[in-house]
Every structure is written in C-alpha cells, then in structure tokens.
C-alpha cells in the first residue's frame, strides 16, 4: 500500500502542514527555474509530478485569489486536480462553494475538502482557547467534507497526527466549503462592529477602551477580534479580503439576500474604516 504524503503548494498553509508531516513530498511550481531554463523546467516538473503521484494522498494548499467576477479563482486548483493521480486528494485551499462536487463529477477522483484554520492574524492566540495559527497538529477540531468514505480515509491521515481531544466533523463538500468562508467572514463582521462601536464612543465622548473592557467582561462575549486602534482601523487580512466577497457572491447566486446584504455592508464599512487610518511613524 502507498504510504507517502505529498503537499502541493509551499505557501503559509503548505509550510504549516510540512511541519505536521516532515517526511512529506513538497511540490511547488519552480517559477525561478522557469525563467532561467524552460527546457529543464518542463522536464523537472514532470519528474516532480511523477513523484507526487506515487504518493497515497495529496494535500492541496494552493492559492485561490478573488477573481473579477467576485468569486474565488479556481484555475490553479483545477489544474492541480487535473494532473494529480494520488489515491486521495484533500483540498485545504479555500474553494468557491460547489467546486469540489464539480471536480468529483468531472474527474471521478476521490476528493475531499478540509476547512483550514491556519492563519496569519495579528491577534494574540491563546492556545487553550483558539486554534494555533501555525501548527495544525494542535487544533481541536477537524472539518472534512466529501462522500463519507473519502472523507473518512482522509481524516485518518490527519487524525493520526493531531491532539488526542480532536473533534472530527464529517460533512458534505458543500458544507465544508461554506464553513471555510464563514470562518473568515464572521471575524470580519466582529471587527467591523467593534470599529463602529469605536466611532459611537468617540461621537458620544465616551471612553472606548472602558466600554470595550466592560462589555467584553461578560462571559457571553469573547475578546477575540474585539480591539481597534485609532490609527489602525478596520481589517486588511488577505484571506478575509477575498473570502468575504466570495461568500457574498455565492449568497447572491443562491438567493440568500440577507446574508449578501450583511456581507456587502461589511465590505463597504470596512473601506470607510481603512480610509480613516493615519500614519503614526
């Protein structure tokens, strides 16, 4: 039985999973070599892909940027899935909802989607409360979407490396894709709200920090994403900046008008907040 693991993409998420699987085969497009020697590039790329395809599972961690149509651009994911021949394909990249089901239908491959909790946020992360932003083996929850057999087999590979109290949620691929986008949209909502509260306190001549501290002392309110600074307003996360509008576009497509309205408002309000930033250097 094949046992090796391949990681496709060596960005922030890919590097996190290479820590979790130090013996994994890492594949990333050798762009510099492409510029220097196209012949060697194509020869080495095919050789590298052959090595990847000798593995049992490929964990896909490639970028999905926001397209001009307001959706996440699936071109890199499509290309990778097209050439992958591993027994299992586990996609960690954020996907436009409906992508995994489409790929399964068109390729017939065993594809699952796993909601990614790796992040680059500026907030302090309490390891006892929130997912570690750089080490997936410490996460307390694992969400994998796909048909039950494929999702279960993919879960086994990750489960073996994760902490003993991990909670595994096997859902549909669509449910996993929506969950991922919601994960990044809800914190954006919180940051936009706290920035609006800052404006309210300033307009009312009230001390924002005192109000924020009194409010967040309520046990029903967690303190995560609940701060703002007078010179650094709003949110600018790369992932939020693409996933929030992508979810808004999907909401519009399926007729979820309230969700779409909320998300579009968050985007517009955040732009106002970002425009109010000042340089303190």
Image (tube, helix red, strand yellow):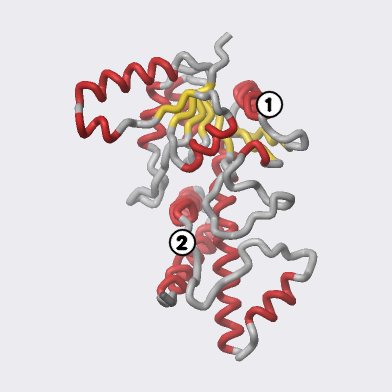
Please say if 91 is above or below 276: above
Q: Residue furthest front?
A: 281
Rendering quarter of residue 154: top right
Residue 5 rendering spot, x and y as whole percentages: 53, 22
Mark 2 and mark 1: span between their CA atoms?
A: 35 Å
Closer to us: 130 or 192: 130
Judge the density around disc 2: few (<14), some (14-19), many (≥20) Cα neighbours within 10 Å: some
Q: Which mark is residue 269?
A: none
Judge the density around disc 1: few (<14), some (14-19), many (≥20) Cα neighbours within 10 Å: few
Closer to us: 75 or 104: 75
Closer to us: 134 or 62: 134
Q: Residue furthest bottom?
A: 205
Q: Is residue 170 left or right of residue 53?
A: right
Please say if 46 is above or below 100: above
In percent of the image, x 39 and y 49: which residue is there? 66
Q: Residue furthest top?
A: 1
Residue 263 rendering spot, x and y as whole percentages: 51, 60
Please say if 275 is above or below 222: below
Rendering quarter of residue 19: top right
Please say if 33 is above or below 116: above
Query: Which sits earlier in the primary sequence, circle 2 or circle 1?
Result: 1
In percent of the image, x 46 and y 31: which residue is there? 102
Whether tag 2 and tag 1 are in contact, CB under 8 A, the answer is no
The residue identified by callout 2 is 236
Q: Is residue 172 left or right of residue 25?
A: right
Q: Which mark is residue 160?
A: 1
Residue 203 rendering spot, x and y as whole percentages: 56, 88
Q: For mark 2, give the secondary structure.
A: loop
């Amino acid at each position: 039985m094949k046992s090796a693991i391949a990681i496709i993409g060596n960005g922030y998420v890919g590097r996190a999973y290479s820590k979790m699987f130090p013996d994994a085969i890492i594949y990333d497009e050798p762009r510099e070599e492409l510029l220097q020697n196209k012949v060697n590039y194509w020869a080495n790329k095919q050789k590298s892909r052959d090595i990847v395809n000798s593995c049992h599972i490929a964990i896909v961690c490639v970028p999905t940027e926001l397209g001009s149509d307001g959706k996440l651009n699936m071109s890199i994911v499509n290309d990778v899935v097209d050439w992958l021949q591993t027994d299992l394909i586990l996609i960690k990249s954020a996907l436009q909802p409906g992508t995994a089901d489409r790929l399964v239908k068109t390729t017939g491959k065993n594809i699952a989607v796993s909601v990614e909790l790796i992040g680059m946020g500026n907030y302090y992360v309490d390891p006892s409360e929130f997912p570690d932003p750089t080490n997936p083996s410490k996460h307390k929850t694992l969400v994998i979407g796909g048909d039950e057999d494929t999702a279960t087999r993919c879960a086994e590979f990750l489960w073996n490396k994760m902490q003993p109290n991990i909670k595994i949620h096997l859902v549909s691929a669509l449910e996993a894709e929506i969950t991922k986008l919601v994960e990044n949209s809800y914190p954006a909502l919180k940051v936009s709200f706290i920035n609006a509260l800052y404006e309210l306190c300033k307009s009312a001549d009230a001390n924002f920090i005192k109000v924020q501290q009194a409010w967040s002392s309520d046990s029903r309110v967690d303190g995560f994403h609940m701060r703002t600074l007078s010179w650094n307003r709003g949110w600018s996360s790369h992932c939020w900046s693409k996933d929030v509008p992508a979810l808004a576009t999907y909401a519009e497509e399926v007729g979820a008008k309230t969700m779409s309205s909320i998300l579009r408002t968050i985007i517009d309000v955040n732009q106002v907040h970002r425009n109010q930033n000042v340089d303190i250097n």
